[in-house]
Amino acid sequence: MRVLTSAAAQAGPELPAWLQAGGGLGLQRALQAPDRIIEVLRDAGLRGLGGAGFPTHLKWHAVAALAPLAGQGKWLICNGNEDEPGTFKDRYLLSRTPHQVIEGALIGALAVAANHVVLYVNPGQPEAVTSVSEAVQAWSGHPLLAQVAEAVGTPVELHVIPGSGLYVGGEETAAVASVMGGFPFPSLKPPFPAEAGVHGAPTLINNTETFAHVPHILRHGAAWYRTLGRGAAAGTKLYSLSGDVMRPGLHELPMGVTLRELIFIHGGGMLGSRPFKAVFTGGPSNTLLTAADLDVALDFDSVRERGSRLGTGAMIVVGEGTSVLRKTAEYVAFFADNSCGQCSSCKIGTHQVSRILDRIDGGAGRQSDLKALENLARLLPGSGRCGLVDGAATVLASSLSTFRHEYERALNR
């Protein structure tokens, strides 16, 4: 059963249509028992859908347990900065069905007693910015918002804040800096935003897709949500499918659907009937999966057992005839271009990797370049304040290990 995307099809972008289609019922039930919201999310098994898969209830509980900061209260950020290659789920939710995202964020505000709710949107997605801005205006005078404010005990303000347009702006501490009007430099943790986020206040940050699930869980219950997944996995997931497949696009499927089903049933199989070669799983910053992994269940734990991560749910498929070396070079170049420059190991390291990859792919590589790449893949992880350099090093190490023959072949042209 599709949950998030069917809501868009039924209700469209208008608030009255959303409410008529059953929107608002989750918020109304949350208002009846605000102290049970986090417990329901725990029972439902909802996890953060922006990459890490951290249990949602633990993050919400941490913010709820803290006292508001004098003069600031508490903040909540719906992170829609989405800018990684191959990921396009959040822009769909924000542009097509912003009201379920806002309703989920308001339930979050109710659960943690936040009085500032920020819709943090990538400015490179103007349709999403416009849609969310119009949706916030519609909610501003609605009685449900007044009821949330009454339950929180202070006026609740909805803000639409375009991000910096930079990939690094999606990291949670960088998002905090951007919301405060600064450059999105990631900062060292601890403290985490839950402890000291926007203006030093307790701040809850979750991905757009995570908030979109919340109204449906509160409306239908935790047990219902668990039945939507497969095996031990709960709920549905938006998979951004792209690359060498017949039907690329956004697919909402049970959490735990297999990679084989996603590609060969829902994705229509390989483009031009080419043999399957590999997939950049969860976006281009994770370990590659190959034909030996086609039957892996696409949920956080199962993919982690294969040495990779589900991440955002982006699946970039590679068929025979497409160079993994070239794709790796493209993605590392993306990371190098998007390094904020704060950490020299990241800025210099990613550019060095990018230059070597381009040299090898261009046929001018040397055997010593492979040794240099191996050393960089070993030295770079953990050297930055955020995960950018780790992502570049991970995809480099994975492609070197699994497709070393492509590197060797390029050296012997």
Image (tube, rainbow, N blue to C red):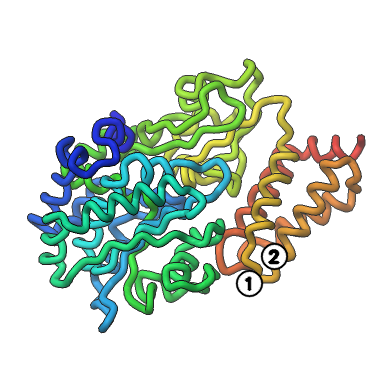
Q: Earlier in the sequence, mark 2 or mark 1?
A: 1
Q: Is residue 175 above or below residue 51?
A: below
Q: How many marks?
A: 2
Q: Which amino acid type corresponds to the residue marked 2 in the rendered image? A: Lys
Quarter of the image where the N terminus is located: top left
Dot 2: few (<14), some (14–19), or many (≥20) neighbours within 10 Å?
Answer: many
Please state the horizontal and vertical placement of residue 220, each as a whole percent of the image: 17, 40
Q: Residue at x 34, y 33 (%)?
A: 230
Q: Residue at x 41, y 51 (%)?
A: 129
Asked which quadrant contains residue 206, the reply is bottom left
Mark 2–mark 1 CB contact (< 8 Å): yes
Q: Residue at x 27, y 82 (%)?
A: 71
Residue that numbered label 1 is attached to:
342
Q: Residue at x 71, y 37 (%)?
A: 324
Residue that numbered label 2 is attached to:
347
Please state the horizontal and vertical placement of residue 15, each as a whole percent of the image: 22, 44
Residue 38 visible? The answer is: no
Residue at the bottom extreme? 70
Label 2 to label 1: alpha-carbon separation: 8 Å
**Label 1 residue SS:** loop
Asked which quadrant contains residue 213, the reply is top left
